[in-house]
Image (cartoon, helix red, strand yellow):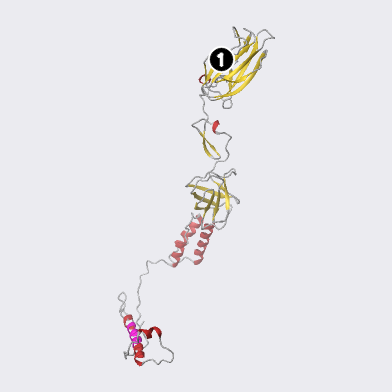
Amino acid sequence: MAFTKQLPEWHALGVEPPHSLKEGGWKAGVKPPADYFNWLQNKAFKVLEELQLKAGEVKSINGQLPDEKGNITISVDTSNFATKEELKAKYSKPTNGIPKTDLASDVQTSLGKADGSAKQTDLEAVDKKVVEHQADLVSHGIYGIATGTNALAMTNSDVTAYVEGMLVAFKNTTASTLATTLNINSLGAKPILKANGTAVTNLKANAIYQVRYSGTSFYLLGEGGEYGTATASDVLAGKTFGTENGIVQGTLTFSKIQAGDTNKLINFTSQRVLGWPYSTYTTYKKLQMKFTGSIRLNINITTYNSVNSSCGYKLLKNGVSIKQTEQKNSISEKFDFSISKLDSIELQLYSTERDKIVINTEIFSCDVIYNDGIIVDLNSLISEVA
């Protein structure tokens, strides 16, 4: 638009005041010299004149000349511009989560009215459904990065309060070592539990987990329920089994299972020992063990045809006595003891009279207590030395 006010012309050049006067200004009672005043008036006129002249240098825009008032009308092709309805419908489409079927249908209906027939009430209804859907954390859930070791913390702009049934997926940054909690947006730390109600203590680093809120706790999804009572010593070495603390490696070692065995390592027939030294403990059998575990000695001995005679036995492991009985007319007892691979086990007998000791059946039969009575290949576990 053209300037309508006349310029305040002033052509007297005057004299420019000194810098000190420009800095300090007029003092009270001082009469300004005419030349200084003329200089100031002339400068103001020239500045305004230049402003009007420079502003009028634009003669046309896109070939359009100014009218008598200096205005220029600009023509713009708006055929490719989106309408208000189109923009609002586009903006109202969900940006978080998967829309429900009825929501998707409503959005498509409104977008189909982009020719201008869409009503404001249609768009407001779609916006309302979008807001309701985004607030529905039970149906579509949220995702975030959980930091910390056992006290996990994460943020998500969609969560303003914990809601029963809400679904949460999170990436765990650090492996947990103790009972673990999750705190979203500082709303309060809640325990993370397994399906059986026990605390989660072994979340892996950089793994992604899903939990649902019960109203008091977050329950880990996809976690197994109950475990048995097996321990590492109950499971074969080289095999693994699940526990509350994760996968555990078995440690049990033994030879092949053989169903027909009688659970006896050595089985002797009942016999009368002739020519047996008397009045001294003498070696009857000496064995070398080929496994580590526990064995049981079942022994039955008696003197032969003499109630006044007595007998006894001594058991040695690697040459050291581990069991010695009181001398009696007869002895029948069991003795459990542990052994290691390559141990030497020696049974010594004693009698007060020569040729008068009877060793009943299974005098050195060893019932395997190893691994709760599992029967093993006995032939490989022991060898007779003497």
Q: Which residues are magenta?
A: 42-51
**Residue 120 in picture, x, y percent from top left:** 49, 67
**Residue 347 in picture, x, y percent from top left:** 58, 16
**Residue found at the very far right of the displayed protein:** 307
Residue 262, visible in the rendered structure: no
Quarter of the image for the N terminus: give it. Answer: bottom left
| Residue 105 highlighted magenta (yes or no) | no
The quadrant where residue 199 appears: top right
- Vertical relation: 41 (above or below) 154: below
**Does 12 sit left or right of 238 as displayed?**
left
Which residue occupies the foreground of this view, 367 or 78? Answer: 367
- Vertical relation: 97 (above or below) 196: below
Q: Disc 1 marks which residue?
A: 285
- For disc 1, the neighbor class at 10 Å (few under 14, some 14 to 19, many from 20) is some
Query: Magenta residues: mostly which secondary structure?
Result: helix
Residue lying at 35% horizontally and 92% vertically, measured from the top left: 34
**Does 165 sit left or right of 303 as displayed?**
left
| Residue 47 highlighted magenta (yes or no) | yes
Residue lying at 50% horizontally and 30% vertically, measured from the top left: 237
Which residue occupies the foreground of this view, 13 or 281? Answer: 281
**What amino acid is labelled 1 in the image?**
Lys
**Does 171 sit left or right of 228 as displayed?**
left
